[in-house]
Image (spheres, rainbow, N blue to C red):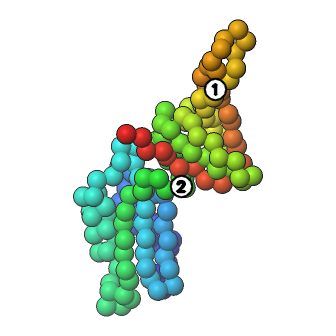
Amino acid sequence: MIDKKNVLEIVEKEIADTDLFIVDITVSTSNAISVMIDSMDGVPISTCIELSRAIEKNFDRDIEDFELQVASAGIGQPFQVIQQYHKNIGKDVEILTTEGLKQKGKLITVGENEITVEVEEKVKVEGKKKKQVILTPYTFTFDQIKTTKDIITF
């Protein structure tokens, strides 16, 4: 069986002098290797192909057969690493807390242990007939977050 550590070392070596970062690497018992990468500017398919070839040349299919998939982190998929939070500062996200609360808003800060999301809320303002939209910051620790996804708006 192909060792995940070996795949991780190969990928880290290949992306060392780039802005790419590893989102996830899995190796199944049937040697199905899946590598998910990302960067602050997105990942073109040509980069996935180059990385796939670099990984493949380190293994011999005659000795041990394997399946290899290299992809960029998908839109609308849950964030898995802190770099994805940094990449999405200033963008709309949806957070699902461990308590089941969903919160949608603009990701405004990412700290070591927490994030802050700015949420638009309509509230009754004294002396006004209509509710007014105000921006309310909510802070969540990573322990409180079950999933965070980017929200695509057109």
- Residue 58 percent across, percent down from the top left: 34, 75
Between 74 and 12, the one nearer to me in the picture: 74
Examine the image and state in which quarter residue 14 appears. bottom left
- For numbered disc 1, what is the local secondary structure? strand
Identify which residue is drawn at 48% across, 40% down: 88
The CA distance from mark 2 to mark 1 is 28 Å
Q: Is residue 83 visible?
A: no
Residue type at mark 1 is Lys
> Which of the numbered marks, if any, corresponds to residue 122?
1
Residue type at mark 2 is Pro
Question: Looking at the image, which residue sits at the far bottom?
Answer: 62
Determine which residue is flagged by label 2.
Answer: 78
Q: Label 1 near label 2: C-beta < 8 Å?
A: no
Examine the image and state in which quarter residue 10 appears. bottom left
Please tell me which of labels 2 and 1 falls first in the chain: 2
> Which of the numbered marks, if any, corresponds to residue 142?
none
Q: Residues within 10 Å of mark 2 (few under 14, many from 20)?
A: some
Identify which residue is drawn at 43% across, 75% down: 33
Question: Looking at the image, which residue sits at the far left?
Answer: 46
- Residue 126 percent across, percent down from the top left: 73, 12
Q: Is residue 5 left or right of residue 38?
A: right
- Residue 70 percent across, percent down from the top left: 36, 66
Q: Is residue 110 above or below residue 124?
A: below
- For numbered disc 2, what is the local secondary structure? loop
Q: Is residue 128 above or below residue 103?
A: above
Q: Is residue 33 above or below residue 99?
A: below
